[in-house]
Amino acid sequence: MNVTKRKWYVSLAVISIGTMLLSGTQAYAATPVNIQDRETVYSILNTDGSMKKTTVVDWLHLEGDGNYTIADGGGLNNVKNLNGDEQPKLQNNQIIWQAKVNGQQDIYYSGDVNKELPVKVRIDYYLDGQKIDAASLAGKSGTLKINITLQNQLKNDQTLSYEGYAKTKHTEAKTIYTPMLSLVALNVPTDHFSDIKSGDAMTVMTGKTMAITWMAVPNPETTVSLEMKGSNIELDPLTITLIPKLPAIPDIPIKGELEQLTAGIGQFTLALDKMGNGITQLVGGEQQVKDGLSKLSGGLGQLSQANQAQIDLLKKSLDTNKSLLGLAQNLMAANPKDPNLQMLSQGLQGQQQMLTLLAEGGQVEGQPFPSLNTIGDGLKQSQSGASQLADAMGQLKKGTADLGTGIGQLAQGGGQMKQGLISGLNKIYAGEELLAQTKTAADRYDTFLGKPAGATGEVRFILKTDSIKASSVKTNSTANSAFPAPTHKQESFWSKAVGFILALFR
């Protein structure tokens, strides 16, 4: 192939490539059938928990057939393609990639970002009870205490609307923090530390190293603590993994039973109220009976007094009649033939018999006739009985009233119990709605930088502190060491295109 012909081939190749690129520019407007955007945020922390450097590794998984333009969330510096030579276009705070997809295609890239993490970390160190900074801690010996405080920064003020007991509507303002499941891990060499107290952390021994892991969900703040005795103290890097997720929370199986219990207590309280009303009426009736018995006792007392007066009068009448009878009999003895004296004597004698019958009692026409004393005794007994009945009715009324009071108190207690159960159930309903809103907030937090339109997202955070060594406080690993690196270098699109055109003319 001479030089002129080769130049012509090259020119043709360049023209053809330009034509392909121009036509490709039009085709790159399509959208993939499916986009998955997975972000892993790596952050290097200082030993006090403050942020030193943050790098994001983004994995875009594309599905479809064709040439596509993908606009991912931006805000990154030093963007690097980790599995190819293609470079994105940075425009309008977006990272724009162009990709030719035949079924599936993956784009891996990284970049640095200066953005606040969703969880702020503070680490405090204490040696023998005195606060100490990490730089001064290295190489020391004594009782070491570490407090790791996690503070959730994802605050959302929302309004909860939910149905409470008996379908009642409730609305209340709540502050919701997007849940961040936090796994705090530290490897502790047991040849430097002893008497290790890590609270409710999970521990695993691997040789002479104890791997300690705490699980926490800061809402909005939580602190995990570690205390141990150390000699020539050195600490490996502390690792914190953050996942926007709420741990599984079981349902409340007794909610239905509590609702039935609340309804039953309501019916019981209603029945007690009706019983209390009936007892109130009964107490009123008993009071009327007591009043009637008291009046009867008073009337019997008056009759008894009248009877006693009659007895006293009868006694006087008997004495008087007896004297008159004796006088009449003496006169008749002196004048036996006088008919008037005979009639007077007979009349006084009959009256004496009648008065005696009243005083002592007897028979009248074959029927018993009580004496005034007997009648008086009966009146006294009747008065005493009526008085006792009135007292007993008073005690019965008091007992009935006490029963009514007890039933009223029981009804009131039942009402208070019902209100307490309703309040508790409403808190359960509110808690369920709060839990649902919290889960929704976790599901929605699927990106740190932003994602392409229509993409499903996932984000994870891995935070690692500097290590503490006796020589100095230094970073245990560089920012790039934690990031996945490409295993091979792919041929760029431009190189492939030029090679393809030139091959046609060989």
Image (spheres, helix red, strand yellow):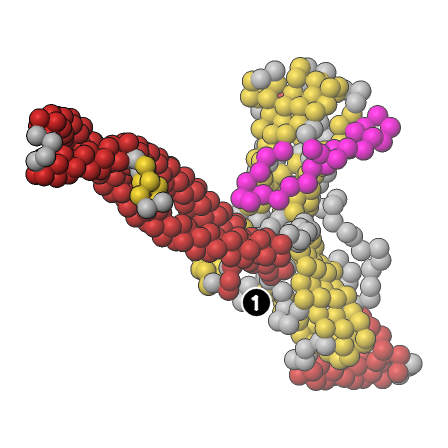
Q: Please state if 193 lies on the left or on the right of 356 as rendered.
A: right
State which quadrant residue 333 falls in.
top left
Which residue type carries mark 1?
Gln
Magenta span: 200-224
Q: Position of residue 498 (x, y in %)?
A: 81, 75
* Along the line of sight, the residue nearer the viewer: 58 or 109: 58
Q: Please state if 54 lies on the left or on the right of 353 as rendered.
A: right
Inspect the magenta stretch and tell me whether residue 203 lies in it: yes
Residue pictured at 76% horizontal, 77% vertical: 64
Q: Please state if 197 lies on the left or on the right of 397 as rendered.
A: right
Screen quadrant of the C terminus: bottom right
State which quadrant residue 202 falls in.
top right
Label 1: few (<14), some or many (≥20) within 10 Å?
A: few
Dot 1 lies on which element?
strand
Screen quadrant of the N terminus: bottom right
Residue pictured at 53% horizontal, 44% vertical: 220
* Along the line of sight, the residue nearer the viewer: 416 or 217: 416
Residue pictured at 71% horizontal, 76% vertical: 32
Is residue 122 at least partly visible in the picture?
yes
Q: Is residue 341 above or below residue 253?
A: above
Say which residue label 1 marks: 91
Characterize the magenta stretch by its predominant secondary structure.
strand
